Image (tube, coloured by chain):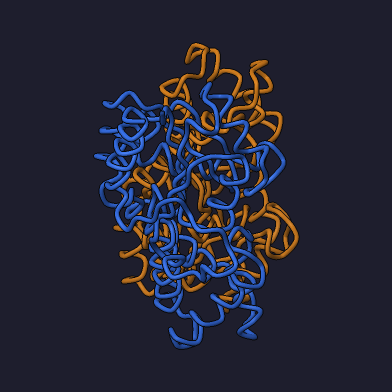
Chain colours: A orange, B blue
Amino acid sequence: MIRAVFFDLDDTLIDTTELAERARRQAISNMIREGLPVSFEEAYGELMELIKEYGSNFPHHFDYLLRRLDLQYNPKWVAAGVIGYHNTKFTYLNTVRGVRKTLLKLREMGVKLGIITDGNPIKQWEKILRTDIDDYFDSVIVSDFLGVKKPHSKIFEKALSTCGVKAEESLMVGDRLYTDIYGAKQVGMTTVWFRYGRHANDDLDYLPYADFTVKEITEIPEIVRGLNSEEQLE
Amino acid sequence: MIRAVFFDLDDTLIDTTELAERARRQAISNMIREGLPVSFEEAYGELMELIKEYGSNFPHHFDYLLRRLDLQYNPKWVAAGVIGYHNTKFTYLNTVRGVRKTLLKLREMGVKLGIITDGNPIKQWEKILRTDIDDYFDSVIVSDFLGVKKPHSKIFEKALSTCGVKAEESLMVGDRLYTDIYGAKQVGMTTVWFRYGRHANDDLDYLPYADFTVKEITEIPEIVRGLNSEEQLE
């Protein structure tokens, strides 16, 4: 009997990758608009390399971009980048198609809901509050707050205990095979791989298959219904 | 002959104090909306004390507010504060009444324009770009970039040399008697005290009087015209 469904946040509930790409493009356009003397392609290419090397939460992307381009530091260009990035982020931040409908249906079915995500707790909560989805959830676990990252078991166990359910009574839905699916399988949860965003075509070979694979988040209630009715037949 | 006019940024060109107060009030309201279990008055009072003690650029206002209120750290409440603060800041950031009209008139008179401001260069440029006033200016000097703060002479001298004018050919307009007026007087500029915002009633006794005092920024072109025609009569 599935009594709780847990979701990853980025690229499962919220369209993060598409948003970040849009925001970075707008940042570069805005820097060029304010005089950055390089082509869009060059600047964007360097920015993407920089993000790959320093990580997406590095707080000095635009300063370091100027260094990489051998340009003098110019706070005007950095400010133009920050404005372009933030304006886009706040304007286009949104849930993945079908998320609200899915969450509502699951609640109507009496299922508890939770979020299990990595990342900076304030930034993750900012996404949750800005998209106004927090009322759907009984539990929100941000891994950084516990000092570990997915797929560490501690995070999944904490989420289960917060909702008062056992692993075998719960479903984990996420877009990443290692952090979400492998992590949840380890503690004994049933898993749904959401093939969405930049990880939609990840290599399956060296990773455990998920119990289910979906391309639309709206398929989740049917999976829960199926699992629960199978059990009643047994 | 006045050939250049320099302006302070915060509370001279841009309504910063009013904006910050609005943003902080909205931050507290939003935190309470998301469950912060204290009254608005208590939380706002603590926040204002905290800002007085740690400075307005301290990056952990909302985290420290929870500590002061003896509450457990909660990233949801911090995120709610950040959202309230940023949304307000981006929505209400604006120039002081009459600023655009004044800048345009001065440019039509053939006067060069500059900004001389303290503060974080990226944040100051963000204000300039978001209000779209940068095209009016020949020179923007942010003191932190030079390693000193107003009233240090270096900043004023740098501004003068960037515009290619002498001190006696220039006017400094600002809301602060010590940083703006005393600083500019030191290097020999003519000064206009803009009695506006929270410094409008500062004590004059221990500070040098400005050459002019105005309550509306729109009075500046007339002062320049007056000074320049007096000279022609001499």
The residue depicted at 65 percent of the width and 63 percent of the height is A156
Q: Is residue A15 left or right of residue A175?
A: left
Question: How many numbered discs sit on the rendered protein?
Answer: 0
In the rendered image, residue A233, in percent from the top left (x then y), is placed at 42, 68
In the rendered image, residue A55, in percent from the top left (x then y), is placed at 67, 37
The residue depicted at 29 percent of the width and 35 percent of the height is B225
Where A134 falls versus A214 (above or below)?
below
Relative to the observer, which residue lies in front, B6 or A140? B6
Where B211 falls versus A83 (above or below)?
below
The residue depicted at 53 percent of the width and 45 percent of the height is B123
In the rendered image, residue B63, in percent from the top left (x then y), is placed at 62, 69
Task: Residue A233: tell me if it is visible.
Answer: no
In the rendered image, residue A41, in percent from the top left (x then y), is placed at 50, 13
Where A86 falls versus B175 (above or below)?
above
Task: Residue B102: tell me if it is visible.
Answer: yes
Q: Is residue A121 left or right of residue B92?
A: right
Relative to the observer, which residue lies in front, A66 or B115? B115
Q: Is residue B215 left or right of residue B122?
A: left
The residue depicted at 62 percent of the width and 52 percent of the height is A119
